[in-house]
Amino acid sequence: MSPLWSQRARDLEPYVPGEQPQIPGLVKLNTNESPFGPSPKATEAILAAAGDALRLYPDPRSTRLREALARRHEVAPDQVFVGNGSDEVLAHAFAALLQQPSPVRFPDVTYSFYPVWCRLLGIAHETVPLDADFRVRVDDYFERPGPVIVANPNAPTGVAIGRAEVARLAAGRPESAVVIDEAYVDFGGETAIPLIGEFPNLLVVQTLSKSRALAGLRVGYAIGDAGLVEALTRVKDSFNSYPLGRAAQAGAIASLEDEDWFRRSLTAVTRNRDDLVAALTRLGFDVLPSAANFVFARHPRRSGRSLAAALRERAVLVRHFPAPRINDFLRITVGSQSDIESLTRALSAILATPEPG
């Protein structure tokens, strides 16, 4: 720790992203990336954008991309905000909307970046326990005033609540911002975007990283009342006025226009998810109901830590969270059929031997 560090840098406990190791033959099921490539039209658009125009700054408002997103979601362009991945969009939402006199509230088991942003920005926060089935109980968020952020489907559990419950949450907190993080909604959740016109306090955040297979491009967006979007834009323009490059904007627009590829990819992922759940169940795992492109599972006779370590020794990478309530769970990305077969073989071999220690 350098003596030149600020006190804030010293006090931070940064978010730990999933590993990106360079291991030959690795079965990588730890970061919820798509097992399928992006739309070929997106790839073509990215390559076409990588020409002489790269010497020029991109459109700081991402106008054409915002218009494309507005058409897709049947909203006005001034209700759309875009950023460098949904993580940046969420970070701006914390600064612009969730930093209030009352603590922001979110589930005790959820996306672990939320408390990191709170610590970075000095935002008071409180966690609200999920129920025994790892579900969000909307009624629990009415006990105290203040803003709320909920991932739906939740991460790392994959469990979702319905649109009617989101509407009840937004209606019950009219004085505060309600942010719904929908990074995984396309895989089986129910988006809250149709509620935007009814609830001016509701902001919905999505990403093209998962269902559009563009994690390497870094494109995220938020949809909400124009007043909320204006607050995000003020924060963006005080931090980075050009968050999305020309190639990112071009690739994102092309991906949004390729509906056939999008639907085929979603069908393949959800089919593979069913196969993964069935395989894990046959091996004795308890698997939470998932509306995402991953599953959250535990084995009654093995610790999550030991299973993750044993899988890594066999070049299969999954995500283990050493945290209260979920220490014995593994979050496993829905991969290709070959990935699922490799995972199943590795788990069968591990479970056939005594647990070390």
Image (spheres, grey):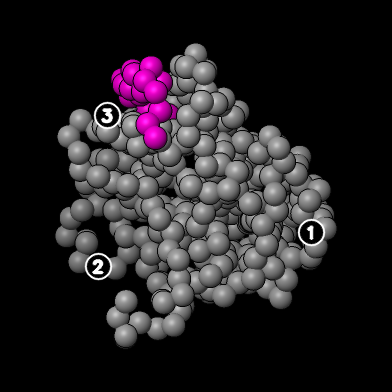
SS for callout 2: loop
Q: Nearer the viewer, residue 266 or 300?
A: 300
Image-based side of 97 in relation to 304, left or right: right
Q: Image quarter for residue 269?
A: top left
Query: SS of the residue at dot 1?
Result: loop
- Placement of 231 over or under 16, stated as above or below: below
Disc 3, SS:
loop
- The residue drawn where x is 22% and y is 61% is 53
Q: Residue at x 68, y 34 (%)?
A: 133
First in sequence, mark 2 or 3: give its number.
2
Residue 273 vs residue 170: left or right? left
Q: Position of residue 19 (x, y in %)?
A: 32, 47
> Disc 1, disc 2: CB below 8 Å?
no
Q: Tell me where the magenta segment starts and ends, as one range.
A: 333-357
**Cα distance in 3D space between marks 1 and 3:** 48 Å
Residue at 74% across / 65% down in the picture?
Answer: 146
